[in-house]
Image (cartoon, grey):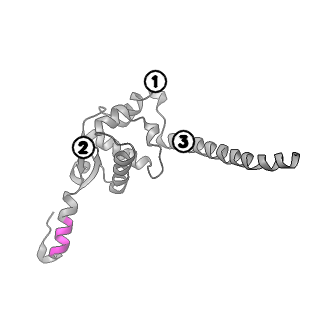
Amino acid sequence: MDLSNRVLGSSVAKQLRERAGAVLLQIGRDEFHRADLARVACYNFTAAANLSKILNRELRVKDTADVFHHIHPQALALPHLGAVAIAVLGAAFEAKRLGGDHPLENWVRHHTEHHTVDEVVTFGSLKHRQEKITKTHAHRTKAHRARVTRFPERRRKAS
């Protein structure tokens, strides 16, 4: 790309050069630049940034292979991480040549007991299942708190 200082201005041209060379997706020690992801037809740069944060800060993965072999898809059913971010993860698998011709499906199969096509569910289904579990736990906690706060009152009234 022609980034002419004369036409764009030196600060804009410099900023564009830096952005083009910056790491867009980092999974542990593996770094992916815009060109790396573009080679596998991935242009979801915001999702890549969200994925980087979650994999590095919350899950503390070593590299892309560590994610493929040790991180269960259900572990990524987190807030701020959607199906587009999983597509970016698939692009990273593809760039690192993990999982063959269908890296996302093979990743899911790798983490299921039966390793069959029928066992592969959509990421949306995984997130929905996780949200349901989270809501159930929240409801139980709220109900427990209500019982705990009512108990002293009832005991006092009974005395």
Q: In percent of the image, x 48 and y 50: which residue is there? A: 79
Q: Secondary structure at mark 1?
A: loop
Left or right: 1 with respect to 51? Answer: left
Q: Which residues are magenta?
A: 10-16
Q: Nearer the viewer, residue 145 or 12?
A: 145
Image position, residue 90 (x, y; %): 34, 41
Mark found first going from the N terminus, 2 or 3: 2
Q: Tag 1: residue type?
A: Glu
Residue at numbered disc 2: 29
Q: Residue at x 34, y 54 (%)?
A: 49
Query: Residue 72, located in which quarter of the rendered image?
Result: top left
Q: Nearer the viewer, mark 2 or mark 3?
A: 2
Q: Is residue 22 above or below residue 56?
A: below
Of labels 1 and 3, earlier in sequence is: 1
Q: Is residue 141 magenta?
A: no
Cα separation between marks 1 and 3:
19 Å
Rounded to the nearest whole Å, what is the CA distance between mark 2 and mark 3?
29 Å
| Residue occupied by mark 3 | 130
135 horizontally vs 80: left or right: right
What x and y, as percent, mark residue 140? 66, 43
Q: Which residue is mark 1?
A: 113
Residue 12 within the magenta-colored segment of the rendering: yes
